[in-house]
Amino acid sequence: MKRIGVLLSGRGSNFQAIARNVRNGSLPVEIAIVISNRAEAAGLSIATDLGFPAVCLPSKGLDRETYDRQLLDELSKHNVDLICLAGYMRLLSPAFIRAFPMRILNIHPSLLPSFPGLDAQHQAVEHGVKYSGCTVHIVDEHLDAGPIILQAVVALEGNDSADTLSARILAEEHRIYSEAIRIVASGNYRIDGRRVNPGVS
Ligand code: GAR
């Protein structure tokens, strides 16, 4: 069974959804380690309370390369095969990404390539789009830009605020992240250029 390492910085609801699916057997992976770069992240206490191995590696004051070396050490201690960013709000260094080529997944709350970066739901509301959603993609060296595994579409309503839109997108995030991890962990997919094709290997 593939061993996943989860990196998070905050609330941890995506991690919680993944953990639920691991526990109920619908997502056949092992959660090898949960790492938070912030001690106060709710996701860290959720992981501990659920009995998963979890540590805080504080990132404050450390440059990216130094911090990412610590991350890599921790991940290799736990023999991680696949990394899942779940609300991890730091950029990863090229050296880190090269250490796990095509084996880092991220979830982003927009239909990429629209609205990369911070506050994607706010950007979508301000732009006046009629549809937004979420994207699970493979992390490459560019921000929110790697090959797309799955997306889900959410329609905007006339009176949406960033908060109301975020809540509907989040429900879809919780669904598609586990589905994307299942595809990658099964190995039953092929990457042709930017295209991720599930069901062919
Ligand atoms: C999620 O909406 C996730 O898509 C977003 O942060 C939130 C984390 O929530 N990630 C990004 O914006 C990454 N660029 P969670 O901690 O409850 O999973």
Image (spheres, rainbow, N blue to C red):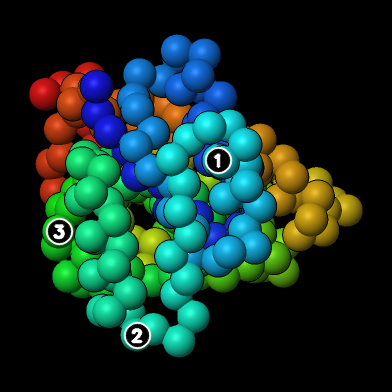
Q: In this view, does 22 lie to the left or right of 47?
A: left
Q: Report how far apart the C-alphas of labels 3 and 1 lie in the structure.
A: 25 Å
Percent x, y for residue 7? 43, 53
Q: Is residue 122 left or right of residue 58?
A: right
- The type of residue carrying mark 3 is Ala
Q: Report how far apart the C-alphas of labels 2 and 3 lie in the structure.
A: 18 Å
Q: Which of marks 3 and 1 is nearer the N terminus?
A: 1
**How many neighbours does mark 1 have within 10 angstroms: few (below 14), some (14-19), or many (20 or more)?**
many
Q: Report how far apart the C-alphas of labels 2 and 1 lie in the structure.
A: 26 Å
- Residue located at (45% from left, 12% from top): 25
Residue 199, placed above or below residue 11: above
Q: Is residue 116 left or right of residue 148?
A: right
Name the mark on residue 99. 3
Q: Are marks 2 and 3 in contact (CB under 8 Å)?
A: no
Q: Earlier in the sequence, mark 2 or mark 1?
A: 1
Q: Are marks 3 and 1 in contact (CB under 8 Å)?
A: no
Name the mark on residue 47. 1
